[in-house]
Amino acid sequence: MPRRRRLRKVVAPPKFKGYMPYGNFGKTNEFIELLYEEYEAIKLADYDLLKHNEASELMGVSRPTFARIYESARRKIAKAMVEVKEIRTVYGNAWLDKDWFICNECSSQFSIPDANMKKECPICKSKLIRLINNIKV
Ligand SMILES: [Zn+2]
């Protein structure tokens, strides 16, 4: 399955569309875009506690590339906290090895095994689902 090399593998999309600060005075409409691969880098390094070389292998990138993605993610999150900005997750240069869907009714995210292709939300049974994987390679 050859893919463009600059794409980074993400196992699962983030389970949220973003984060919103609360309790802030002087609301702004500004937001920071956190790429899927940046979310994945934070998850692998700071949640799964993988070493950078292990994490870079999982994402299919070199170790320096991983370090760059990870650093960018941390800076964005720090900036969002200090400057009180909303974080929104966006696709970026990621690819997902399964088809992931989002439900337009309840916003659940899920992947559907090929054998069980019902084309409906497993949570609310809505048929109003759409593919998250918007990059076709
Ligand atoms: Zn649903």
Image: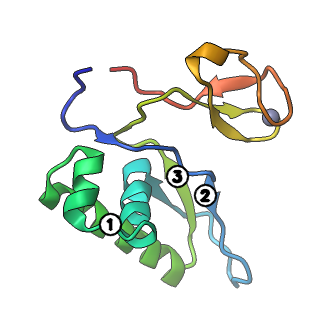
Count of marks placed on residues:
3
Q: Are marks 1 and 3 in contact (CB under 8 Å)?
A: no
Return the residue at label 2. Answer: 18
Q: SS class of the residue under badge 3? A: strand
Mark 1 Cβ inside 8 Å of ligand 1: no
Camera-side residue of 13 and 23 = 13
> From the viewer's perspective, is 118 left or right of 13?
right
Q: Nearer the viewer, mark 2 or mark 1?
A: 1
What type is the residue that disc 1 sits on?
Leu
Q: SS class of the residue under badge 1? A: loop
Return the residue at label 1. Answer: 50
**Which residue is depicted at the point 80% across and 20% down?**
127
Mark 1 closeness class: few <14, some 14–19, many ≥20 residues within 10 Å:
some
Q: Nearer the viewer, mark 1 or mark 3?
A: 1
Q: SS class of the residue under badge 2? A: strand
Return the residue at label 3. Answer: 89
* Picture coordinates of residue 50, whole percent (x, y): 32, 66
Mark 3 Cβ inside 8 Å of ligand 1: no
**Which residue is depicted at the point 40% across and 44% down?**
10
Distance from label 1 to label 3 (Cα)? 22 Å
> From the viewer's perspective, is 81 left or right of 25?
left
Camera-side residue of 67 and 60 = 60
